[in-house]
Every structure is written in structure tokens, then in C-alpha cells.
Amino acid sequence: MLLDKLIAKRVASFETELLQKYYAEVENMYAKMRGWRHDYRHHIQTMKIHASKGEYEEIVKYLDMLDEDLTNIETVIKTGNQMADAILNSKLSIAAEKQIKIKAEAQIPVSLTISELDLCIVIGNLLDNAIDACMELPAEERLIRIYMEMKGNYLYLVLTNTAGGTKKHSFRTAKGEGHGLGLARVDAVVKKYGGYLTRASEDNAFSTEVLLPQI
């Protein structure tokens, strides 16, 4: 009984920290977007000054700088589900900053019955693990593919990332206790909803498929 209470306390603490982390990441992304919008007029004024002086090469350089800056904060995908958007875009923004190539496609045109906390646990932990695995590879080999859609009454998610062969990231990461617990919590969420989860590792890539009933 005491052991069960300790485990429950540990899981509750982990979930609280997880939510705080994700909300902080989302807020940071939105803060960057608000800052960019706030500076918009300044950017326009700077380019007008360059244009009045005929400094067209400077305008091109300035536009290149703005393009790079905006790329780091722009929304990657819009799924149709606000919480999924927040989690996915915050994590994919972090991946982009780490020079990880991203291929994402997600459409969720319904209200999900899965709780926001459980959605955070599944998407967040899978992407955290994928990012960690990619960071062990050279920048040019880093890739994450994520696909989400409704298949009948199921939310379908498949995530694939490049990885170093059959290293430790294949089915359990060794990057600290928190990461191992994170993947265990993904398994627990899938079991909670009576869903399905499969993992596979081949050709220097690792993939996870998840089906969660939405009834």
C-alpha cells in the first residue's frame, strides 16, 4: 500500500512538472511571436530608410535576417485542435532550433475525448525522445516525421525519427530517469484508453504508432 502511494505521488509530480514545462514552452513561443509583431513597424521603417538611400543590397540582407528570425517562431502546423497545435508547434519549434528537419502533417477536425494532460503526455514525450535521438546524429542526418489524423473513431499518430542504428533510444532512452518515465507514461495513457501502440526500429530510424479511441 505504501509503495502504491509512493508510485502515485511520483507519477503525479512528474505530470505536474510535465505540464509546467509544456506551458512554459508554448508561452515562450507565443512571446516570441508577440515580440516580432511588436517590432514589425520598426522593421518596415528600417527598410524604408535603406530604400530612400538606394541601398537595395542592404534591404535584401535585412529581409534574409527577418526570414530566418521568423522561421524560428512561425507556427509549423494547424491541426484543428488548439491543444494539439500548442504542443506540436512548441516542440517542433525547439526541434527546428536544433537543426532537425521536420516533416509534419496533422488534421484533427474534431473535439477529442482524450484529456489535455494525456495529450501532452503522449505527443510531448514522443517528440522529446525523438529530438534526443536526433541530437546524437550530424545535423544533416536529423529528421522527424509526424503524422496525425482521425481514422474512424480513432486518433491515429505515427512519429518517425532518425537514430543511430539500434542504440539505446530504440525502445528506452538512457538519458535520465525522467525520459524513461516519460515513455512509460505514454504506454500508460494508451492502456488507459484501451488504445494500441507499436514501436519499430530499422534502417537507422525509429517509429512509434499510436491509436487512441475517441468515442
Image (cartoon, grey):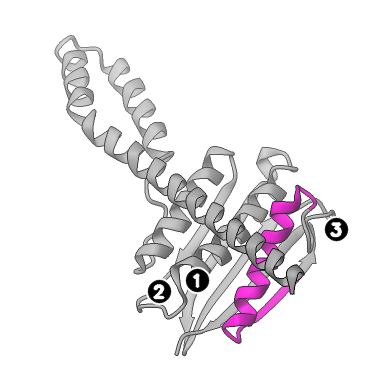
Dot 2: within a 10 Å radius of its alpha carbon, few (fewer than 14), some, or many (20 or more) residues?
some
Q: Which residues are magenta?
A: 174-199
Tell me if residue 30 comes above or below residue 210 in the rendering: above
Which corner quadrant holds the C terminus? bottom left
At which x and y percent is residue 151?
A: 49, 85
At which x and y percent is residue 31?
A: 34, 39
Q: Say left or right for 96 vs 162.
A: left
Tell me if residue 96 comes above or below residue 40 in the rendering: below
Q: Amino acid at mark 3?
A: Thr
At which x and y percent is residue 124?
A: 55, 58
Q: Are marks 1 and 2 in contact (CB under 8 Å)?
A: yes
- As drawn, which residue projects farthest toward the front? 2
Note whether residue 207 is visible: no
Residue 185 in which image quadrant: bottom right
Q: Say left or right for 135 vs 123.
A: right
Tell me the number on the disc at residue 166.
3
Q: Residue at x 44, y 53 (%)?
A: 89
Q: Secondary structure at mark 2?
A: loop
Q: Secondary structure at mark 3?
A: loop
- Disc 3 versus disc 1: distance between alpha carbons? 26 Å
Residue assigned mark 2: 108
At which x and y percent is residue 129?
A: 67, 55
Q: Secondary structure at mark 1?
A: strand
Residue 65 in which image quadrant: top left
- As drawn, which residue projects farthest toward the top? 53
Is 182 magenta? The answer is: yes
Residue assigned mark 1: 148
